[in-house]
Amino acid sequence: MIVITYTVIVCLILLVTKMRFGSFFRLNSLFTVIWCTTGSLSSMGLFDLFAPSLIIHLYCICILIIFNLVYLILSNNITKISTETSVEEQYPLNKQKLCFIFLLNALSWIFMAKFVRRSIELIAYGGLKYLRLFSYDPNMELGTTAELTIVQAIVEPVFTATILITVIYTIKNRRNFYLTFMSLID
């Protein structure tokens, strides 16, 4: 029932966003899809994910509805705010910067390969619950404290920055195949 509710919310928000802005790709639709997907997966309890109570799902649904209403009401004011120069003019994404982003992502992927392989083994053996036990304890052989710190302090911010840059360029209708590809892998 919760999965159906989240699916209906996504469909309605995407429909309203398309009617209002002429495009599915807006911040509210991205936010809604992410939260509804996560809520649906957690409600099913797949891979030993913690299944939250119904009250938690109701809070999430209320927050989604309120966020989208506020976004749709204030979106005209948000889009009318203009700055002297846009993000693209201040920070253009030329080939050198794209190569640098790709290099950082490639190095991060290489560094993460060990963790991904070990994580897949742990998930196959005992599910996500088992992986959670290993990920927060350096004595459990997922990685040393230094390696886990590098992942948290360097690798995750690289992935997050790449995804955010991709979202900004997608919303501005300046899609870049390489950025999208890197974000999907991240």
Image (cartoon, rainbow, N blue to C red):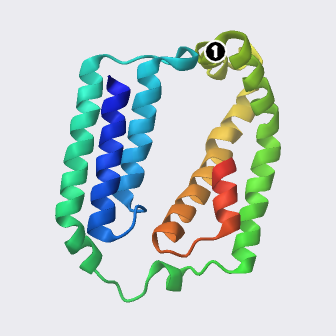
Question: In the displayed structure, would residue 143 be above or below residue 24?
Answer: above
Please report the residue visible at 73 percent of the width from the left and 55 percent of the height from the top.
105
Secondary structure state at the residue bearing disc 1 = helix
| Residue placed furthest toward the top | 126
- In the rendered image, the quadrant that contains the N terminus is top left
Q: Nearer the viewer, residue 115 or 21?
A: 21
For this view, does 147 lie left or right of residue 71? right
Percent position of residue 48, x then y: 54, 14
Please report the residue visible at 68 percent of the width from the left and 81 percent of the height from the top.
94
Q: Which residue is mark 1?
A: 127
Percent position of residue 9, x then y: 30, 42
Query: Is residue 183 visible from the viewing direction of this image?
Result: yes
Q: How many marks?
A: 1
**Quarter residue 82 falls in:** bottom left
Please report the residue visible at 55 percent of the width from the left and 64 percent of the height from the top.
165
Question: In the displayed structure, would residue 145 be above or below residue 122?
Answer: below
Percent position of residue 93, x then y: 63, 77
Residue type at numbered disc 1: Gly
Percent position of residue 41, x then y: 47, 27
For this view, does 146 lie left or right of residue 52? right
Please report the residue visible at 69 percent of the width from the left and 18 percent of the height from the top.
123
For this view, does 163 lie left or right of residue 18? right
Query: Is residue 142 visible from the viewing direction of this image?
Result: no
Q: Residues within 10 Å of mark 1 (few under 14, many from 20)?
A: some
Question: In the displayed structure, would residue 41 be above or below residue 180?
Answer: above
Q: Nearer the viewer, residue 174 or 186?
A: 174
